Amino acid sequence: VQLVETGGSLNQPGGSLRLSCAASGFTVSSNYMAWVRQAPGKGLEWVSVIYSGGNTFYADSVKGRFTTSRDQSKNTLYLQMNSLRAEDTAMYYCARGIVVASDDAFDVWGQGTMVTVSS
Amino acid sequence: DTVMTQSPATLSVSPGERAILSCRASQSVDINLAWYQQKAGQAPRLLIYRASIRATGIPARFSGSGSGTEFSLTISSLESEDFAVYYCQQYNDWPPSLTFGGGTKVEIQ
């Protein structure tokens, strides 16, 4: 069971970026998945979740700018990031909701991909 | 949104000693609380969910307790690999607004 994030890069304010999270060993579309970010030297911040049924929810700080989606054929989770701001600079992790219970805790995490927003 | 506050920010402990970390919620989260461990340069690792249930493969020296607004994570006898930052996370809010505490760094005294 593994998650691998890609797509992080240096971007200008106002720009767009799409992060990918490829899963192996389980099916993304059958699980509760999330994006969590961590600014340099700071704590963890929840970004978004997508339920197995497809419903998505976002933190207020990214609502209207970020979109979470998934591709069943590629077994991959995505985070489309638009109107990027300096405060979006962070390591972005994808994570899987725990499968042994219905709790919204995360038992599998990727290694993260770094997004930097700067002019 | 529920605000999670962890204390202390830093805990200095000697190997073999017990560490108790606290997490307080701004409103009741029932027992919908998880604890994570994060080492430098690594992703978080789930330790505890539903306030007191150890995740798969987590050693018995880690235990969680509490309900409502007050929670604690106890490491009964610290080992060298336990020095890390620990975060609590609530998942009680609906619509979902998963909030993390600011973290407690457990360092070697």
Image (tube, coloured by chain):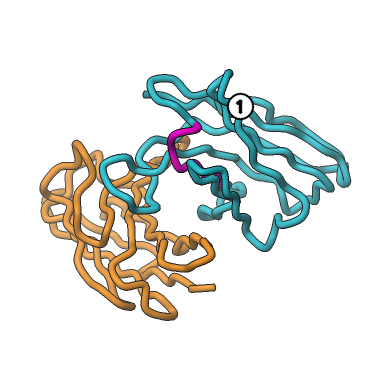
Chain colours: A cyan, B orange
Q: How many marks?
A: 1
Disc 1, SS: strand
Whether A93 is among the magenta residues is no
Q: Measured from the top left, where is residue A62 in percent x and y?
A: 70, 55
Crowd rating for badge 1 (residues with CA inside 10 Å; few <14, some 14–19, many 20+): few
Residue sitting at x 62%, y 25%: A6
Residue sitting at x 41%, y 61%: B91
Q: Check the picture and name the quadrant holding the C terminus of chain A.
A: top right
**Image quadrant in which you'd find residue A59:** bottom right
Name the residue carrying label 1: A71
Residue sitting at x 42%, y 24%: A2
Q: Is residue A50 above or below residue B3?
A: above
Q: Check the picture and name the quadrant holding the N terminus of chain A.
A: top left
> Magenta stretch?
A29-36
Q: Measured from the top left, where is residue A61 in percent x and y?
A: 69, 60
Q: Is residue A34 above or below residue A59?
A: above
**Image quadrant in which you'd find residue A106:** top left
Q: Chain of mark 1?
A: A
Q: Is A119 placed left or right of A55 in the picture? A: right
Q: Measured from the top left, where is residue A45 in percent x and y?
A: 55, 55
- Report the amino acid beneath label 1: Asp
Q: Is B32 placed left or right of A71 in the picture? A: left
Relative to the observer, which residue lies in front, A71 or B44? A71
